[in-house]
Amino acid sequence: MGSSTSINAKLRAAHFRQWLPISLIGLIAATLYLYQLAEEGFWIDELTSVTDIQTERGLPPNNLVRPLYYMLLSIWIQVSNHDAWLRGLSVLFAITSVFLVYQLGRRLAGEAEGLIAALILALSPLFINHAQEVRMYAMSTCLGLGGTVALTYALMREPGKRPSLASMAGWAGLRLLAIFTVPLNLTLLIPDILLVGWRFRNQRAVLFDFGKWLLLIVVLWSPGVLSVVEVASPSSSYAQQGHVAGRRTPQLIDIIRTLKFFTVWPFSVQSNAIAAWFYKLFAGLLAGLLGAALIKNKYHNSSKLFWVAAWAFIPLGLIFAFSYISMSLWVTRYLLFASPYIFILLAAGLMRVWRQWRIVAIAIAVAYIIAVGGGLVRYYTVQDRPNYKAVVQVINTNEQPGDIIIWSMYYDKALAHYYHGSAPAHQHILPKTLETSDLEQLVSDLPPIGSRFWFATQVSSQSSQLLETFLAENFDILTHESFAQKLDNDGSMEVFLLSPRSTDIETK
């Protein structure tokens, strides 16, 4: 009896020790994902998500390209439309992703590798950014990882035994959900097919079973096929949009840069020259770790790491090729679903260096801590998203009965989301780079003004002084707030409380 109790106690202690490290990493991830969750307001894409469910534009049958996230969000928003709550949906999928990448890493590379990969994902400023937004990319990554974990249970079945129904059904179901979240998850099916085909090449019955599940994915996804093909066409309305048509075709060096974006520094600009060189060298170091992960040595068999490499590089290669053939899709948020597999390879490479050259491994770890620390400080201290929230908050706080709002920005959805008053709003678009004639036309187009009105606009740094001078010459400026825009690397959002001059009122 005493011996049995002792054994049970030891098993519980061993179980606790096994789960303690990943639980701590999960706690770190949750803390980072929730920290300052509502500090920055929604940017354009997040506002689009909210608008698309309110207008049902994002829901089937209006949207068959990537409807799943919008369907969940339409349920989630019934509780609250507060920024933190709406972003919380992505937080849940992001935290789940940390545990899934650990599970995948430990199965295919080792316990230490799984923990390191989970930590890299938890600390990634890029992943934190998408965990803190009302978009589908954290959910896409989570479902993609879930499908891959399910497939590993089939791939790692003992030779001669057929994979379980649960593993195949889990793989098919999660792959389908991931595709309905972001269609680029289709690219994961290519390494899936190659790995299953090779692993079970001598078991026709297994290949036949796999083929049936693959056919089921195709059949269930068929309602969205035409929509995806239409969007992917170079002549589609999506491809002709300015932000899409203006994308640069990726170069080979962009693959190395993507390693930096995934892990430590997702920002396009590094103003400090020394820091810029440090991050460039660090990106090269990451590429070296990937090579170390895939080189066979006496310490570890690399076969399962090549599975991970297939899930990482085949999708990235297909997207890279498509970006040359059609429109460029080489955008970090579109590539995010492949990042966990890169992290597992980086973790495996670091552990191989650790086993052979511990001092070098420690130096790499220190460099990573410095690099990711810089990225995290940059993420949490710099306003990157357009500050619509702050602009509208100025109006919410200071408005009075009789005010009207002139919203001179392209995106009026921000006003609809953040404004809680009753003042009538009129939209009059001004270019970011202003001419005096633009402002004169604005004045002539103004609706009847009572005692005062709010004017919100977004201008380039070159136009800021012209704008303020013109308004001071034509109106009394009662309030003026300016919010710099780091995202555009130029210009600012301006909000004025203006009052017509007394002579102007008499004339009208």
Image (spheres, rainbow, N blue to C red):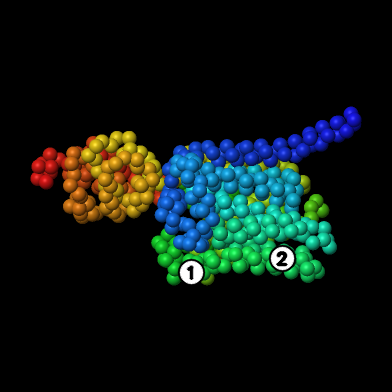
Above-or-below relation of 294 to 392: below
Q: Nearer the viewer, residue 55 or 254?
A: 55
Q: Which residue is mark 1?
A: 230
Of the image marks 2 and 1, the number of the one nearer the N terminus: 2
User: Which residue is at 53% across, 65% downward?
Assistant: 224
Whether residue 271 sits left or right of residue 200 in the image: it is left
Q: Nearer the viewer, residue 300 or 175?
A: 175
Place residue 147 in its image quadrant: bottom right
Q: Nearer the viewer, residue 277 or 2?
A: 2
Tell me, yes or no, whether the two marked residues, 2 and 1, touch with CB atoms within 8 Å: no
Whether residue 237 sits left or right of residue 290 in the image: it is left
For mark 1, give the secondary structure: helix
Whether residue 329 sits left or right of residue 503 in the image: it is right
Say which amino acid is labelled 1. Glu
Q: Which residue is mark 2?
A: 210
User: Which residue is at 48% across, 57% downward?
Assistant: 59
Say which amino acid is labelled 2. Phe
User: Which residue is at 53% across, 48% downward?
Assistant: 130
Q: CA distance from mark 2 to mark 1?
A: 29 Å
For mark 2, give the secondary structure: helix
Above-or-below relation of 107 to 61: above
Give coordinates of residue 26: x percent, y percent.
64, 40
Location of the N terminus by quadrant is: top right
